Structures are given as C-alpha cells and as structure tokens.
Image (cartoon, helix red, strand yellow):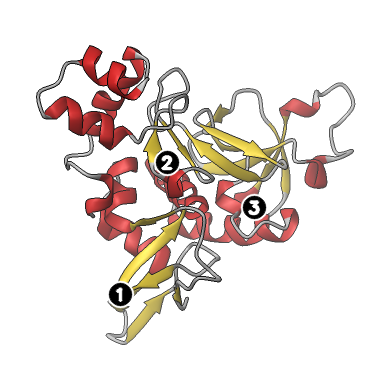
Amino acid sequence: MQSQPITRETIPTAFYTVPSACRILHVQPRKVNRWVCGYEFVSSADGVARRSGPILLTPVYEAHNVTLITFEQMIEVMFIDTFLQRGIRLPVIREAAKWLSLVCGSVHPLAVPNLFTYNGRIIATKNIDAIVAGVAPDGVSPDAVYIDLAKMGQIVIGATVEGLLARVDYENALDPTRFWPIGKDRDVVIDRERSFGRPLDPRSGVPTNVLYGMYKSGETVESVARWFGAHRKAVRDAIDFESTLGYRSFLAA
C-alpha cells in the first residue's frame, strides 16, 4: 500500500502518528507499523525476499517522512489487536476485512459496528441488514444470527457472543465518530470532529494533556477545574488517562 501526502485538500479531520496512537491503545508500534504499512521478510522455505501487505484497506498518510493514521484507522488497529488477543490469526482477519468491505461497502471494515469474536476463534458480525436480512431460521431471534467471516459468509447460530464496541460511538450505522479510551463512564473522549481528534473533556472541550499538564505543574484538582471551568471528575479522569500514556504531551510523538 502506498502512503499519500497530507495536503490542504486531503488533510483528515483527525490524525495520529503511529507512536501516539499506540500510546492511546497500549499496542506495540512495531506491530502497528506492520498492520498499516505492511512489511518485508525473507521466506524460510526458499530464502526469497517477500512482502506482506497491510491489513488496512486504505492508505496511510505521510508528512515529513512520518506515518500518520486517521481516526478510523486507529479504531481498526484497536480491533485488530483485540482479535489477535482472542486467538484469531492475521490471515483470517485480513480475509474477513476484504469480505466485509465488499458486503458493507465500508473502506474501514474492521471499524464497523457489530463485530464480535465467537468461541474465541472467529470473527463474526451481527445484524448488519445487508447481510442477515431474512436468514434467521424459524424460531431463532435475528439477534442470534451471525455471519462467520472466517468462512466467508457462512451463517452461524450463536448463543453467547462478546461485543467489542462498548467504547465506540457511531453515526450512519457504519462510521465511528467518538472513542472513549477509558470507558463511557469517564470524562475522556476522542472525537474525530473536535480538536483534530485530541483526547479531551467532552463537556468543557479542554484537551486532557492541558488539564494534566497544569496539575503536574503543582496545581490542585480543584484549582485546575476552576481555572478551565471543568468538573473535578473530568480533571481526575484526565490525570488517570494521561498518566497511563507515559509521556507529557499528546502531540509530542
């Protein structure tokens, strides 16, 4: 996959360096670079140099030799990492992404809603109208019908399925718009339409690194909240979030 330069006409509403996205998601940059850019390797079978392409279907951006990914691509990276942790192999994820993109018409198929793991082995998608309309057998709830993407469209009747999307908000059924990195009960959100996707307090709009930076300078939670017109809980949540990133400024990486 070729990268594309950022211009005034093509600049996305939210974008991240790979290191900054990895700090938010707690994923190793080396892995993410392989998923979004692909990598070269020497085959152990014949000693020939080969290339494995990226899993993402859309090209990354590049500015001053730095790779940048969009908000939607960061959400896809989060799910790729989650699927791998659930024991799903990369070739399965790769083929599932291609198949789901064709069915749903999304260029970010691994960021669409209703993705699940099933029995810890396969990727499945539930209740996407374009796929499952009319396929539920008699007496079976449509909520229990899944498409086994690992088998490219085979219908699966699932009893227990674990959702992976509790921290993502969507619009237009397919487009991720907001990501709550430490949960929707905490006052930290990454919104692709606000502040170029920087983590912020959803009420006051103050970036979390700004709240955290003032607290680290010696101010109390109460004084930081008063200065920025934020709730004390929002300041505490910003401190909790930023302290897990391991660096001071979100834009530093």
Residue indicated by mark 3: 151
User: Which residue lies at the image location 23% right of the left edge and 38% below the top edge?
Assistant: 245
Residue indicated by mark 2: 82
Mark 1–mark 2 contact, CB under 8 Å? no
Mark 3–mark 1 contact, CB under 8 Å? no
Closest to the observer, 60 or 15: 15
Q: Nearer the viewer, mark 2 or mark 3?
A: 2
Ranked by sequence position, the earlier of labels 3 and 1 is 1
What amino acid type is highlighted by mark number 2? Thr
User: Which residue lies at the image location 67% right of the left edge and 45% below the top edge?
Assistant: 174
Mark 2–mark 3 contact, CB under 8 Å? no
Ranked by sequence position, the earlier of labels 1 and 2 is 1
Mark 3 residue crowding within 10 angstroms, few (<14) / some (14–19) / many (20+): some
Residue indicated by mark 1: 64
**Residue 243 can be seen, yes or no:** no
What amino acid type is highlighted by mark number 1? His
User: Which residue lies at the image location 40% right of the left edge and 20% below the top edge?
Assistant: 186
What secondary structure is found at the residue carrying circle 3? helix
What amino acid type is highlighted by mark number 3? Lys
Task: Give the spatial CA distance, label 1 vs label 2.
Answer: 31 Å
Q: Quadrant of residue 160?
A: top right
Ranked by sequence position, the earlier of labels 2 and 3 is 2
Task: Give the spatial CA distance, label 2 vs label 3.
Answer: 19 Å
Q: Position of residue 151 (x, y in %)?
A: 64, 52
Q: What is the number of the mark on residue 218?
A: none
What secondary structure is found at the residue carrying circle 2? helix
Q: Nearer the viewer, mark 3 or mark 1?
A: 1
